[in-house]
Image (spheres, rainbow, N blue to C red):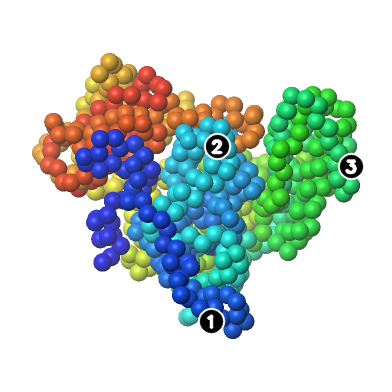
Amino acid sequence: MKRRDLLTTIPFTGYSLYVFAGSAEGAQQPSHPVSAPRFELIAPPGAKRGRVGAEPHMTLAELEADVCVAGGGLAGVCAALAAARRGARVVLLQDRSRLGGNSSSEVKMHVVGANSHKGRAGWREGGLIEELRLDDAANNPQRCWELWDLLLYDKVVSEPNITLLLETTLYSATKQNGRIATVLARCDKSEHLYRIKAAHFVDATGDSRLALEAGAEFRTGREARSEFNESLAPEKADQETLGSSVLFTSRDYGRPMPYTPPKWARKVTKDHLKFRSTRSWEYGYWWIEWGGDFDTIRDNERIRFQLLSIVTGVWDYIKNSGDHPDSANWALDWVGMMPGKRGSRRVVGDHLLTEHDLLRGDFTDAVAMGGWPMDDHPPGGFDRPDLPPNTVLRTPEVFNIPLRSLYSKNIPNLWMAGRNISATHAAFTSTRVMATCAVIGQAVGTAITQCLDQKLTPRQLAQDPARVTRLQQALLRDDQSLRGIRHEDPADLARTATIEASGELPHAPAKNVLDGWVRDIPGKEIHQWQARLAAEGAWLELRWPRPVTLREVQLTFDTGFQRELTLTSSDGINKGIIRAPQPETVRDYRLLAGPRELAKVEGNHQRLNRHKFEPVTTDRLRIHITATNGSDLARIFEVRCYS
């Protein structure tokens, strides 16, 4: 059975809310029967040790999948989820005990992306990263980082097509006919070695460890300005990059809290902080950065020590210099022990993204979107107090990222997802941020399933304009954000319907739900229907000139893209973020085909909602909204219908 045929026999598990006919309350129902992960695959009962000669005490387990994803940061998680939800069997390797990379509780870096904190209102990413953010905001109002870890774990282990291997490090790859055939990984906690065979491999390790083992072409350091005429590039090429950071958190304990730094802490003075503000201190500083002029991989221990010496020195300055008397009752309650890394290896693909590409912003093979400014830092980091901690080059608009930058130039079944995509150093300073990495991961996972179904290499997919168009439409169906590309899925029966509604606001008519766009740009564009909720609610109805047969309805609601939405320990950044279901979002609604109820949902907080049911033939479909999560307006961006 082909993968696309399989999808007609099981529910499409695209997003958190999936409602089946007969459900009384559909909100947050599991998209498949919940069962424990298949531990017999990762710890085979009865398996004997010593099958690998050099490792007599390790047990070898053989795994086979369609896709092997190495790296469990947000890029790897989204690549794995996207591929698995489209029917691919996935093995996901992560060398830490938790998923999320720099967004996890080990580093506590807030996720930023195309909306540049609050700088590009309306351009928050959709798709999987939006699903994760919405679940986190609704279920974690207390801003607990460990609950973010748990959310990511829940998403991954709840997908029956994903085999998750935590605390497992990839260390070797074998090739046949130039393609990766297998990889070897080890989990010393469980004393297992894993030999993983797959058709496609994704390097989401950040440091490109899989690409290194496979012999992929890659770049490090900064290109010379003359190579691509990039304004951010140095005059001469070098091996320097962005440094790593260690964050901290602190709180007011309501009584004097003395602090004595360790003997090896740096002595920090005002001169060190000329360009670095310490006005608030509940959350650490990204500019506590060091090691970009060292090898960020091999010198990791040196970098960790130096970062901790800076953290403790900066905190000593805050507490004991006399310049911050308001800090008397404050104390550290967490210090990161894992450097949050920015730069290392970048794998070369068929297209190398440059500064100019980001400024132009568009590609015919666009599959993901970015928008964070190019944000370069002096490699010396904190050791260069004479320099501002960053240099920013803002693109005029959000920009698209091409498929050709997401697969290896010389290894035909190797993909990249995350900060290691094919880019110059200058372009990397923008594409490295985590929400951008997440949407890149979703693009890669989705593209892989098309390659599997059609027996294509990544290059063959990228070189076929018709197939690229189908990939883009598949991504849009999953709410992936692409600049300037409209929904034009010919299978969507809603496009042939007319629209009626209980009411509409003049600036947001009902016809907007069929215009192919699913976001508003504040002050510029409105692409949603809005109507005031009366006592009986509000409704929107699609009508066809003759009956159609429906099996699935997809709804896209408003979740407040004009606001920032991220988990952060910074009180300043958290201002304006709603740590709850977003008030604009439809909470309770029913789907009706004439008098027949197809679905009833209560308690929704997600943006993308899919409803699958037994075939029904009808000439009308009504969405009857009875409550939102706080707004007095019913709002819908898009309605799709499939047979």
Q: Residue 198 vs residue 358: left or right? A: left
Q: Amino acid at mark 1?
A: Arg
Residue 105 vertical placement versus 62 (above, below): above
Contact between labelled residues 1 and 2, with CB atoms less than 8 Å apart: no
User: Residue 172: image x %, image y %?
Assistant: 58, 73
Task: Estimate how packed mark 3 is, as few (under 14), some (14 to 19) or many (20 or more) residues with alpha carbons within 10 Å.
Answer: some
Under circle 3, the secondary element is: loop
Q: Label 1 belongs to which residue?
A: 51
Task: Estimate how packed mark 2 is, as few (under 14), some (14 to 19) or many (20 or more) residues with alpha carbons within 10 Å.
Answer: many
User: Residue 154: image x %, image y %?
Assistant: 46, 49
Q: Is residue 224 visible?
A: no
Under circle 1, the secondary element is: loop
Q: Is residue 309 visible?
A: yes
Q: Label 2 belongs to which residue?
A: 566
User: Residue 637: image x %, image y %?
Assistant: 35, 33
Q: Amino acid at mark 3?
A: Lys
Q: Residue 131 vs residue 72: left or right? A: left
Q: Label 3 belongs to which residue?
A: 267
